[in-house]
Structure formats: C-alpha cells, structure tokens
C-alpha cells in the first residue's frame, strides 16, 4: 500500500523560509520513472503544482515560483523535502505531496492528506 | 506554463448527466487526468489517460479528449458526486504539471 504524509510547521511568519517534508512508503523513489510532486491549494482556490523530483534527481519547478523553491530527496529515509523562501500571506495554503510515474505522464496517485500552512505575523 | 480552462460551476439534477469540460490549446495530443475533491479531502483520480477509469470508480464516470477540449461526463448523477473536479496534464516540454481552475458540481 502506497502512502504519503506531509509534515511541517502550521504557522510561519512573513519573510521566513518554509520547510516541508513528505514521508512516503510502499514505493521507492529510486525506481525508474518514479517522481514525487508538491501541490498546494489556497483556501477556496484551485490546485497549484509547485515542484517535482524524479528518481534520477532531476527537479522541475513551477515557472512563477522557481526562484523561491528547492526540492530534494533523501532516499534512505523515503522523504522528499520542499523549501520555499520569503513566505508571504498569499502562500497560506494546504500543501500536498503526491506520487506519479513521470516518464509515463501518469496521474498523481495517491496524495497525502495535506498539511495546512498559515503565513502570518 | 500550459493553461487549462474550466467552467467554475455546473449544476445538475439527480439522475441527469453532468458534463465538465477542460479547454487547452491542442489538449487532444496530451493525456488528461481528472480528479474529484470533496471538502476537507485530498483529490482522488476518477479518470486517467483521457478515458481510463481506475478500479473502484463507478462506470457512471467517463472521459474523452479531442482537439482543444477534454470532457468528463458523469451519468446518472447522485448526491454523492457533489464535489470539485479538476483536470490535469503534464507539459512534456517543461516537465511541469498543470491543473485546470476546477469545476464545482452542485447536485440540485
């Protein structure tokens, strides 16, 4: 059974750096074609794809957020880490991680349950 | 990044058919995935690769994709189908994923 779980601070202050961790089980991120993405959803808004990291360490970012995002993985811990710098109240959202087979352009399946992040002073 | 356009809302009576569209330039050459999201829950795939239905998804859910429009159809709509629905594609050039703006399906 494949599961993913997001963790991180529920509250960050403006200008701070957010670090989120996705801990997964049931698959290996060393498997050819596998990837994990981060996706967020602001309250009442649509899903927004943020970044992805592939089995071979290739990383891809949302063009509009590229300068603020870094995605990495720790295969020994089955974790994917996302950092977002210079946080702003508009970054208040639920942040999800999700698995895909990126070389097959597969859907995101499954998703973690999400972690809510509020940006406020 | 690739832009996908969805109507914000669709209202449908129980037992009728809901049609949700996702517009994008030449979207027909891409594989489109559809997600259902209920309040407070993570999205779940209901249609993958344009028209494939994952195990456990009712046959009432179907999809198609051609030209500039992909379509998710929900036949014999039930109250439990009330949710937000999102389309998604992979941009093969940039490696980025794109989501549509979502369609809220209301069952009257």
Image (tube, coloured by chain):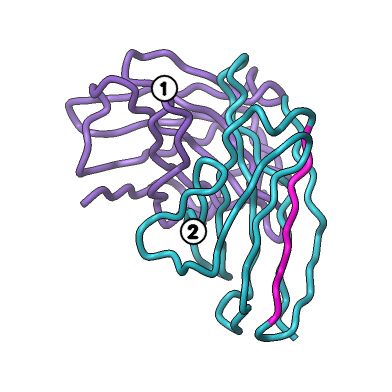
Q: Is residue A26 left or right of residue A118?
A: left
Mark 2 crowdedness (10 Å alpha carbons): few <14, some 14-19, many ≥20: some
**B9 falls in the magenta region:** no
Q: A37 or B56, which is in the foreground?
A: B56
Q: Colour of chain A?
A: purple
Seen from this angle, which residue lies furthest left? A76
Residue placed under numbered mark 2 in the picture: B42
Q: What range is drawn magenta here? A: B16-24
Q: Colour of chain B?
A: cyan
Residue placed under numbered mark 1 in the picture: A103
Taking B50 as reference, is B83 above or below it? below
Q: Position of residue A45 (x, y in %)?
A: 72, 54
Residue B106 visible at all: yes
Q: A108 or B16, which is in the foreground?
A: B16
Q: B14 or A95, which is in the foreground?
A: B14
Subunit bearing disc 1: A
Callout 2 touching callout 1 (CB < 8 Å) = no
């Amino acid at each position: 059974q494949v599961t993913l779980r997001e963790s991180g601070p529920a509250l960050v202050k403006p200008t701070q750096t957010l670090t989120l961790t996705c801990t997964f089980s049931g698959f290996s991120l060393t498997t050819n074609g596998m990837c994990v993405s981060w996706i967020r959803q602001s309250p009442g808004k649509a899903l927004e794809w943020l970044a992805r990291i592939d089995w071979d360490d290739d990383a891809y970012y949302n063009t509009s957020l590229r300068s603020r995002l870094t995605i990495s993985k720790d295969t020994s811990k089955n974790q994917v880490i996302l950092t977002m710098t210079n946080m702003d109240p508009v970054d208040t959202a639920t942040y999800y991680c999700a698995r895909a087979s990126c070389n097959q352009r597969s859907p995101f399946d499954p998703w973690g349950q999400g972690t809510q992040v509020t940006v406020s002073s | 990044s690739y832009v996908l356009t969805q109507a914000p809302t669709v209202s449908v009576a129980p037992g009728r058919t809901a049609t949700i569209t996702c517009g994008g330039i030449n979207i027909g050459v891409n594989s489109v995935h559809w997600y259902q999201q209920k309040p407070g829950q993570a999205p779940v795939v209901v249609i993958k690769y344009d028209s494939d239905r994952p195990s456990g998804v009712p046959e009432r859910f179907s999809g198609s994709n051609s030209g500039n429009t992909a379509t998710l159809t929900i036949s014999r709509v039930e109250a439990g189908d009330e949710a937000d629905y999102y389309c998604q594609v992979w941009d093969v050039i940039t490696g980025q994923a794109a989501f549509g703006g979502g369609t809220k399906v209301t069952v009257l």
